[in-house]
Image (tube, grey):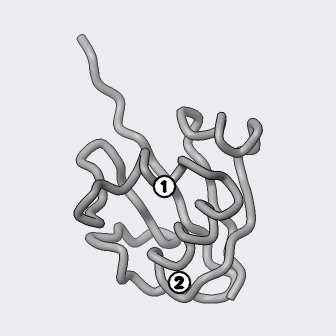
Amino acid sequence: MACTVRVASPLRSYTNGAASVTAVGGTLHEVLADLERRFPGMRFRMIDEQDRIRQHIRLFVNTQGAADLSAPVHDGDTVHLICALSGG
């Protein structure tokens, strides 16, 4: 299943500056694995060593926030990779 992935600007160095890429997978786990194959190192910026979404990252499938990587992704969906901003 192919989906569109909207890439947050801090992660675009992995996608050669592309704000949007296509990926395949039936779950967020599979979509991120596909991205990692094509853009090495990108997944580690979003997912920790325990396979959990990092605190400063939010993942959405269409308009639904994903609590974990088992969230389903269907053909034609849009996955949004959002990075939180911090500072003072």
Q: Residue 43 carries which label?
A: 1
Between marks 1 and 2 in the image, the one whose residue lies nearer the viewer: 1
Question: Which of the 4 quarters of the picture holds residue 12?
Answer: top right
- Separation of residues labelled 1 and 2 (CA atoms): 17 Å
Instruction: Looking at the picture, tell me which residue is in the foreground, 82 or 27.
Output: 27
The image quadrant of residue 52 is bottom left
Residue 73 badge: 2
Image vertical order of residue 43 relative to residue 77, above or below: above
Estimate the x, y position of residue 33 in percent, counting from the top left.
54, 70
Q: Which of 78 and 34 is in front in this view?
A: 34
Residue 35, how many percent across, how many down? Answer: 62, 63
Dot 1 or dot 2: first in sequence order is: 1
Pick out the residue farthest to the top. 88
Secondary structure at numbered mark 2: loop
How far across and down, in percent of the image, does residue 55 sit?
Answer: 23, 47
> Which quadrant holds the N terminus?
bottom right
Residue at 53% of width from left, 59% of height from top?
80
- Identify the amino acid type marked 1: Arg
Instruction: Tell me the residue at 54%/49% (across/down).
Output: 42
Q: Which amino acid does label 2 sit on?
A: Val
**Is label 1 in a helix, a strand or a loop?**
helix
In the image, is residue 15 above or below residue 53?
Answer: above
Dot 1, crowdedness within 10 Å: few (<14), some or many (≥20)?
many
Q: In which quarter of the image is residue 74?
A: bottom right
Image quarter of the C terminus: top left
Residue 66 coordinates in the image, percent (x, y)? 34, 70
Q: Which residue is drawn at 69% across and 71% down?
A: 23
Residue 64 drawn above or below residue 75: above
The residue depicted at 59 percent of the width and 60 percent of the height is 36
Q: Please rate how many residues cluster around mark 2, counting C-alpha atoms within 10 Å: few if below 14, some from 14 to 19, many from 20.
A: many
